[in-house]
Image (cartoon, rainbow, N blue to C red):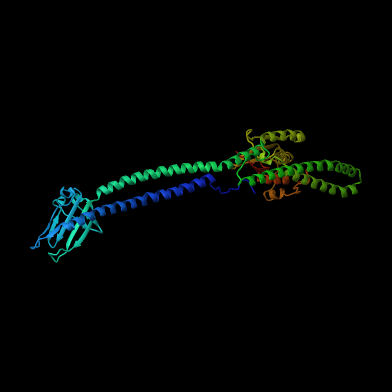
Amino acid sequence: MPINTIEKQLPSLRSRLLIAAAAWLIIITLSAGYLVPSFIKTYLVGQEEQQLKLYLDQLTALVDVTPDGKMSLSGKLSNPLFESPYSGLYWSLTINEQQLRSRSLWDTRIRGNKEEGFIGPNKQPLIVISREFFVPETDDPVNLSVAINKDKLNATLQKLTHGLWLILIIMAIGILALTWLQVSWSLSPLRKLQQNLKKVRNGELTELTGVYPTEVKPVIDDLNALLFHYQELLERARNHSGNLSHALKTPIAILNNEVAQLNDADKTKLTPALLQLQQHIDYHLGRARMAGAANILTAKTAPSSRVDAISMAMDKIYAHREVILVNELDSDLSIAVEKRDLDEIVGNLIENSYKWANSLIRVHQQSVNTDTVSIVIEDDGPGIAEDECNEALKRGIRLDESTPGTGLGLNIANELAHSYRGELILSRSPLGGLKAEITLPLPRS
């Protein structure tokens, strides 16, 4: 799969935990901020109504009706606010068309109803409780109401609400800060693991070290076992491929020499078989080298210097062709590919260009995204037809038998690029020849 495949990134564990904690804190804070003042208001109103009921009982005991039907009070209430105009504490007595009211109501009366609310002097909102009762001297019911100004209660409730919101906000911030500290402390082993993995990638460590919590320890042990096994396996594959290469080189050379001395008929029979044998050996040794990057996690190579080194070698080999290679790669550019593998990829492509270019080979780079870079190698030779570009990447395919080669170079370069989750694309170059674009990963920061 190409390295530039875009995958959806999930939020970090820290972010997810903090977002969840913040969401719950907001829900709890808002609920408390609205429910607690409602409970306090109900309690305060209940307390005021309890006090008003006491005044209601006192007034009921003081109500007197004369034989001629006149209503009066036989005494005064204990609270002097009933005598002070617009004091906020009021009472009103009504029987038939007669009405008695407290001096505090002065020239006004209690207006309104239970559904819409009661209004007193100066448009004061009131809490009102009422009672109907009968006295022996009359058959008509006496309607008695006692009221108190609601503004003081509202002001008290507003102060309590402001204080409550302040306490809730401070508490929420404090809890969120403690949650952040708790999350940071809990995730510190994972940060340590990330740092150790970075050191493994950079070649500073060969295994993950340190003390980890019980929940993480099995993962660390498995990763260390996997790293050890992977490095041992790759080193063994590298050694085996090298040993096989040396073991087969001499016998094949002897066979080639012997075949060269045979007559033309026998030579014609044996040469294709030897050539096929050589192709199979080259292909499978290339695959072994591809799997042999023992430090693939720490791989980091500057392609510009490798192109210069390969170009110097090719200039000597193909000096008779007088081909010029222009290296436009940034000297500071590094890619996450092992040096020998990069030489194999770029070397095969550059050698192919040296074989076919008329006079010019151009090597330059193109940024794909923040994780990958494309190295472009193009020449001014005859190139390959668009419909044959994919065919040329297959193993052993040679589009021109007149030029020496095994037909394995492009295939090995393609499979090496794929082993690093990159890709090789062939197309026509603006120079007229072949354009090879290799997408490879950048080192992770």
Residue visible at 38% across and 43% down in the picture = 167
Residue located 82% across and 45% down the image: 278
- 223, 347: nearer the viewer: 223
Please, which residue is most extreme toward the bottom here? 139
Q: Between 319 and 221, which is closer to the camera in this rendering?
A: 221
Task: Specify whether residue 443 is in view.
Answer: no
Count of marks placed on residues = 0
Which quadrant is home to the C terminus? top right
Can you see residue 91?
Answer: yes
Side of 217 relative to 94 (left or right): right
- Quadrant housing residue 137: bottom left
Horizontally, is 275 left or right of 443 in the view?
Answer: right
The location of residue 246, given as percent across then percent down, is 83, 40
Q: Position of residue 10 (x, y in %)?
A: 55, 48
Q: Is residue 275 left or right of residue 168?
A: right
Relative image position of residue 364 (x, y in whole percent): 64, 37
- Residue 419 horizontal/vertical position (percent): 69, 46
Determine whether 83 is above or below 444 in the image.
below
Q: Is residue 165 above or below residue 314?
A: below
Residue pushed farthest left? 68
**241 or 387: nearer the eye?**
241
Q: Nearer the viewer, residue 329 or 194?
A: 194
